[in-house]
Amino acid sequence: MNAYRHTIVAGLLAALAGWLSMPGCSTRDADKPAKSASPARPSGVPAAGPVRADLGRAMDDLDAIEDVCRDMAQTTSQDAAAMARLAVEQKTIEGLTAKIRAREKAVVSGEASPRSPATAPAPTTLPPGVTRSGAVLTVSPGANLQEAVASARSGDTVRLTAGLFPVDPRVSLAPADHVVIEGAGASTIVRVADGVGDFSGVFGGQGATLRGFTLRTMTIDLNPARYGGTPSGSNPACAVLAWRFDGVTVDRVDITYGSIVGINLNGPARAARNAVVTGCNLKFVQVGAAGYDNAGVYVECYTADVSHNTFAATTNFSSSAIELHGGPARAVGNTISGYQAGINLVHAANGDPDSPGGDMTVRANVMRDVGYGVLLWSREGDMLRNVAIEGNDIALGKRWRCGWVAGITVNHGGPEVSGMYDRVRVTGNTIRFEPGDTRSLDRGHSGGVNFNTTGIVINSTASGNTVVNLPPGLE
């Protein structure tokens, strides 16, 4: 888990560093009127308020990242390599803090521009291949998709017709607030072009803020075999990536990914809220020969719903289909095949005081050929609470060489999972082992339902569950 969090931290620091290098530093609020009248200023001196507000958000981001690093330091005190990496990250944070303070001073004095090209108003002249009818922009194959999305105003629907839309996602598609981007179904294909190299995300992107954004009814092909990059924390190559958001819905989108995360909705405290992923089909295709931590849908926010999706993988390096952090959250009616872990449930890790660190429901999911069905995580000093795991059908594949396997289990071993688990209710699930499973398994931690952990489990129950073909010696 910490390895993945290191990659996220590295990516966010790189994104902030890139943002600070832009002219004017970005000002998402530059077009908003000031809350109160400002004193007169000399001609040519920019209005500093909006820019300073946005720089304040950058400081908030850095504070949140520093909190994550501090938390990781508490769980890696015996790991010299991890501590060295944390020291580098802390030094980067200090350098970026100094740059933000210097930029704030320059803006107030009039030495820096308050406007970034990224926040210019939507153009009045539409690009070729794009037409407008009221609040609907229709985009035909051959049109520049980045320009089409940039033409949308708040409240617009960007409608992609059937056909192929190649994209270079080194320029992410980050729409205005309350924009819908929709296709004509699976026949609308947004495909990452061959050889573009490393990128963060097709829609959203690191540093983007998404509010009231809906993406629906299309195919996104991240072109994992030919895009030419290497998945990493700073270049996670996601279909959808958001750091700050409130109200993101991904609906009936087919995604082929080989990235760190297919859909990544993961942000700081009180700045990441209300995520829905529903009706999507995600297929994992490994990039390169080496394994790397990955997830189909990774959500860390306040209130998440990941339901009625399909996840498929055939490689031995498909880490997890769904990972939910914080809560409230639910995963209902998903079909998962070929992942080492079907669903990971993790206490709140972004420090959001509103997050319950639980209030999670996992219900009526079907999992086939998985190493673990549902895996619970709570770090030392934290608590994962009020979790209901009900009516799931889980088939464990014997090809997984994990050392221990279980249908539903509290993770074990080390400070990352040595926290508390309170009110975990496991009821009415069916867990199937493959017939003839002769693997040598850790008997202490393998089985149908297993609460054996180095942490503390309280007020938790398992009842009415069925285990089929349990290997000899397991419970």
Image (cartoon, grey):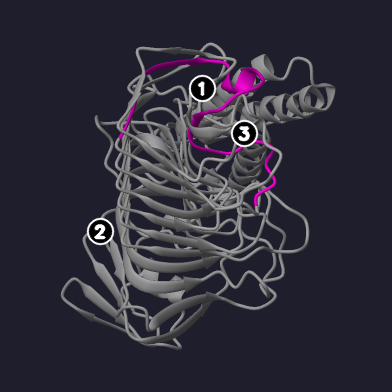
Say which label, 2 or 1, has the lower sequence index. 2
Under circle 3, the secondary element is: loop
Disc 1 and disc 3: Cα gap in Å? 11 Å
Give amino acid for label 1. Answer: Ser
The quarter of the displayed image where residue 404 is located:
top right
Q: Which mark is residue 154?
A: 2
- Between disc 2 and disc 3, whose residue precedes? 3
Residue 193 position within the rendered picture, expressed as x and y whole percent measured from the top left: 60, 77
Number of other residues with Cα within 10 Å of mark 1, as a class: few under 14, some 14 to 19, many 20 or more = many
Q: Is residue 94 left or right of residue 40?
A: right
Can residue 242 be seen in this snapshot?
no
Q: Nearer the viewer, mark 2 or mark 3?
A: 3
* Residue interval drawn in magenta: 400-427
Q: CA distance from mark 2 to mark 3?
A: 37 Å
Q: Residues within 10 Å of mark 3 (few under 14, many from 20)?
A: few
Return the disc, 1 or 3, that comes first in the chain's sequence.
3
288 or 64, which is in the foreground?
288
Q: Is 24 situated above or below 419?
A: below
Relative vertical location of residue 17 with respect to residue 80 in this rendering, above or below: below
Please tell me whether residue 413 belongs to the stretch shown in magenta. Answer: yes
* Secondary structure of residue under mark 1: loop
Dot 2 amino acid type: Ser
Distance of label 2 from label 1 (alpha carbons): 40 Å
Q: From the image, tell me which residue sits under label 3.
A: 1
